[in-house]
Amino acid sequence: MLRNYFTIAYRTILQQKSYAFINVMGLALGLSACILIFLVVRNELTYDAFNQKADRTFRITSHGLDYNPSVSFAIAPAFRTDFPEAEQVSQYYYQREAQTQIGNQRYLEESYAYADESFPQVFDFNWLAGNPKTALQEPNTVVLTETIARKYFGDQDALGKIIRLDNDKDLRVTGVIKDLPSNTHLVFNFLVSWETVRKQLDTPNFWSISGGYLYVVLPEKLLPKRVEARIPAFIRKNWGDDIAKDAALLMQPLREIHFDKRYLTQITMPRSKETIYGLAGVALVIILTACINFVNLATAQAVRRSKEVGIRKALGAFRRQLVGQVLGETTLLVGLATVLALGAVWAFLPLAKPLLNIRIDASQLIEPQVIAVIFGFVLSTILLAGLYPAFVQSGFQPIKALKARSTEASFGGMTVRKGLVIMQFAITQVMIIGTLVVASQMDFFLNQDMGFDKEAIVSFGTGEKADVLRQKLEDNPGVEQISFASAGPSYNVNFAPFSAPELGMSENDVVEFKMVDENYIPMYRLALLAGEPIIKTAEGDTARSVIVNQTLIRRLGIQNEADAIGKRFRLAGEPALIRGVVRDFQSESKHKKIRACVLTYNSRAFWQVSVKLRPQNLRETLATIEKDWTELNPESIFRYEFVDEHIAKLYKQEETMYNAFRLFAGIAIVIGGLGLFGLVSLMAVQRTKEVGIRKVLGASVGSIVVLFSREFVWLMLMAFVIAAPLAWYGMDAWLQEYAYHIQIGPTIFLIAILVTFVIAALTVSYQSIKAALVNPVKSLRSE
């Protein structure tokens, strides 16, 4: 019996190739999107789950005036002493870049870290060489990831080889580990032993926070709440009541680091679980769209096959046999679609890293859990797409079916097919609106006024002989302006406490602290609202006069910029005099509100050069700068970064979401277009004689097109009424995650419905014009 069902299904598909093609392509696109989204969501929700002790591993974070994922290096030794029951206590110190050298070959590497000997016992790395218990015990030792080991030494054994770090440390390779999985908050290409820098980093100061991370593993039977309850006493014992009054240490579960939105200054930006669940919802609506396509086409096709059903019933076929036949056809089509979907996903996975910022290995497709989920998708698709058409076809009455008077099921006077078309249009419009909102927010991030000039400005390290470098840059005809500073406006590396008891601000707040030269404000075009600009001061001058932003003076209770000039406050415990006030500028991403900022002159802290380039001959100018810099720093590699590129990196996750929306919205639109194309094609076949009669009676091609289009216009409008509030609610909730965001205006909704109209018009017009151009003689002869 089953063989018979599939034989008939196979013959039916061969007879109706266009119908089969549209259904298979729609289902394949839907299934491929679902499988891909499942892999992405699975990757996100299993962050750091590769560690066997993940459920009892915590990162110790600090909370003073804001949430900071880093703590002082003074915390770890004290924690080991006061909490001896802790299974592991490990320090990790992240560094953004380093220069390495093997023989005469130099490399500029991003992301490495210092870690103590306990670190390999906290995290379950896959060790290819070396002993995890001893690899990081001794000073001047390093553990490489597999990619870096292969890059440096090819197929040779890396153990025992020497790597020179930043021209001042010779490191011996003591281990090689597999590359980190993509779903971990850790980011590094190699690990240097903590002992290498321990003496330089040791500090008793609680507030000396310099990017150090602290991890603790608790015994299985020790409740985290018991440890948390003892932390305030731990702070009082080691640093006194004054620190305990203003500060707290928090225990952040390892599995929650990737999702904790309170910490926005860590190595990788956290991602909200709502966004991940929203992506899973996108998968649901895409497969629903594909199934709606199938149902619409199948029910429309059922009218054409009504005589076949009538004959089968007249010959004694039972309803369950007819249901089985339709489900057999559906299973065959879904099976073909699944094969195509898996091929498409396999081909796309190499593009997932650059497009979606995620690394998924194709081998995951054959993991038991993934196979089970794919099977679930396939079975659900067969049932969603096949059951309703099966019951519609099997429910035809033989006499009516043979007279070709079969009708469609309806609810409240509206056919089910129309309701499904409305749902499909609504889903498409929601996806289009979502894509437009994300695109507008990305434009707001990257192109709206940030309070400073970022065009054609390039930054790089000062290196050695800064004064000579300045002179060479001034002599370069392609350089328009130069500034030396601790950091540019969009780089935030130094923070300090500030207060002003005499102005009524007794509690400390956090201020961003930038040491800049006299060219900083004019080059970046910061708006000086009151007072005087930065001036060059002599070395050792202890009188600290500063330029502050509007946020700082508002925090001091001063509303008028001019009134702030000459006021004093305490900066890192030292007196500071306000010399000028600049307009607020965006020094951090727009995830956070602008914080208080201080600019002051201090040439001993100038680590970064910023150069505004003339638009002519940019490449030649950069080549000349690189040549001059390299001559002054022959042992180092020149690395530069355009400011606008640095700003774009702050929104890498938003760019990923935008790419995901574009990809999956495109898939939803294509699926919807395929379904609409198929429906209009079947409509044209079913109304062949009607079109012929209308043409004989003088109907024009335009009137035939209107005849076919009129019904879909109303369906689109009804879908928009449903889609607009749903899209607004969902995207407005997403925008609330940012301190600064766009307002969703009517233009976005207007564009969305116009795009839908254009897609539908092109699809409907093609088939309706084709039907209208058929010779009416042939139309009236057709059966």
Image (cartoon, helix red, strand yellow):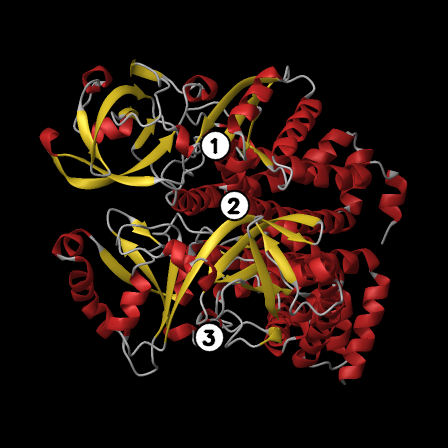
Quadrant holding the C terminus: bottom right
Which of the two marks, 3 or 2, is nearer to us in this view? 3
Q: Which residue is mark 2?
A: 430
Q: Amino acid at mark 3?
A: Gln
Q: Tell me which residue sits at (33%, 56%) in the image.
A: 71
**Any part of residue 147 in sight:** yes
Q: Is residue 455 visible?
A: no
In terms of depth relative to the viewer, which is nearer, 286 or 484? 484
Give the mark, 1 or 2, whose residue is nearer the N terminus: 2
Q: Judge left or right: residue 377 versus residue 85.
A: right
Residue drawn at (26%, 53%) of the image? 205
Q: Secondary structure at mark 1?
A: helix
CA gap between label 1 and label 2 equals 21 Å
Q: Is residue 280 left or right of residue 637?
A: left
Asked if the residues shown at circle 1 and circle 2 are in contact, with their CB atoms under 8 angstroms apart, the answer is no
* Residue tagged 3: 121
Instruction: Say left or right for 358 vs 350.
Output: left
Residue that label 1 marks: 444
Residue at 32 percent across and 58 percent down: it is 61
